[in-house]
Image (cartoon, helix red, strand yellow):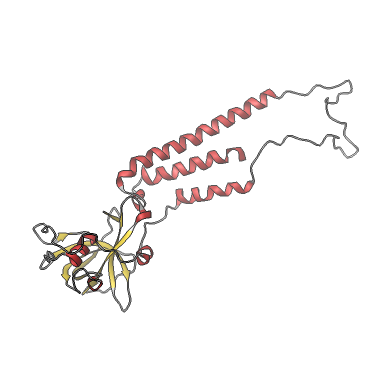
């Protein structure tokens, strides 16, 4: 059975990849939506490869079994090439062909594959956000394009932060904005609307966060997904550490989890 361990491992990993990419949207926890076709193809290839390897090894075993015939016996009925048994029933020739097999501990390699198949890990959350240093926009202080007409205007946390910290034209002034993210807590009762940004996959995630003030019901639990509607609260001098993190005065807070946990750059 150990001969088929690598085949099973390939099939399990392929099935796990297919589960998160073909049969659900769990893949969005790890990569951008545009990479889904590659995940589906990769998962399918691994499953097929595992099956093909199992069939080939089974055929090789059958061929070997058919190729080995009964050993010729001498005039006394003993197989040629073997010593007669001793008084304890043991033959003089103690060499037996047990086949080549890897260590049994190698089967432990299937456990991570089973875990990924049955219990996909969650998206990055508050722990990752708290470890990320404050991210500064690359464009520096300057004017930004005008915001779309109508309130509230939907913004990502990255867009809101860039305008709040670097926009000399103060395009956020007097506008009502709406943003979605998860909750992280700070010191002295402060709390933040937080979102992770990805360029390719979760491995390159960086953080944006906005301090929320004035929410009627206070701070929701950590990692709760919410949508905040409110207005920009100016703070600090543009382009300085005093302006970060930006602040929003909340007029409404409701629970809402987006389909994609990450913002795209």
In the picture shown, does residue 109 fall above or below 122?
A: above
Q: Hey, which residue is sitting farthest right in the picture?
A: 87
In the picture shown, does residue 56 fall above or below 226?
A: above
Number of marks drawn: 0
Percent across and percent down for residue 201 are 35, 51
Between 101 and 59, the one nearer to me in the picture:
101
Residue 93 located left or right of residue 217 = right
Percent across and percent down for residue 207 are 31, 62
In the image, what residue occupies the spot 83% across and 22% down?
Answer: 73
Between 171 and 168, the one nearer to me in the picture:
168
Between 36 and 1, the one nearer to me in the picture:
36
Residue 212 position by quadrant: bottom left
In the image, what residue occupies the spot 31% across and 52% down?
Answer: 199
Residue 15 located left or right of residue 214 = right
Q: Hey, which residue is sitting farthest left in the picture?
A: 149
Percent across and percent down for residue 77 are 86, 23
Regarding residue 1, the answer to whether it shows in the image is: no
Regarding residue 58, the answer to whether it shows in the image is: yes
Q: Quadrant of the C terminus?
A: bottom left
Residue 215 position by quadrant: bottom left
Percent across and percent down for residue 156 are 22, 59
Residue 240 position by quadrant: bottom left
In the picture shown, does residue 63 fall above or below 49?
A: above
Q: Quadrant of the N terminus?
A: top right
């Amino acid at each position: 059975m150990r001969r088929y361990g690598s085949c099973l491992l390939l099939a399990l990993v392929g099935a796990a990849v297919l589960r998160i990419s073909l049969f659900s949207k769990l893949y969005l926890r790890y990569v951008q939506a545009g990479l889904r076709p590659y995940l589906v193809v990769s998962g399918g290839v691994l499953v097929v490869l595992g099956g093909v390897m199992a069939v080939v090894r089974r055929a090789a075993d059958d061929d070997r079994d058919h190729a080995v015939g009964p050993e010729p016996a001498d005039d006394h009925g003993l197989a040629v090439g073997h010593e007669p048994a001793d008084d304890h029933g043991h033959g003089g020739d103690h060499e037996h062909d047990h086949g080549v097999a890897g260590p049994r501990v190698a089967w432990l390699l299937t456990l991570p594959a089973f875990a990924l198949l049955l219990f996909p890990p969650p998206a990055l959350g508050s722990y990752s956000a708290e470890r990320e240093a404050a991210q500064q926009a690359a464009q520096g202080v300057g004017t930004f394009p005008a915001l779309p007409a109508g309130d509230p205007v939907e913004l990502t946390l990255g867009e809101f932060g860039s305008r709040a910290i670097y926009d000399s034209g103060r395009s956020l002034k007097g506008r009502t904005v709406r943003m979605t993210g998860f909750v992280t807590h700070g010191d002295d009762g402060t709390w933040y609307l937080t979102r992770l940004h990805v360029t390719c996959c979760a491995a390159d995630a960086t953080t944006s966060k906005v301090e929320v003030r004035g929410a009627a019901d206070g701070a929701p639990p950590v990692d709760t997904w919410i949508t905040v509607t409110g207005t920009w609260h100016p703070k600090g001098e543009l382009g300085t550490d005093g302006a970060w993190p930006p602040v929003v005065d909340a007029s409404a807070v409701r629970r809402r989890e987006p389909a994609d946990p990450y913002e795209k750059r």
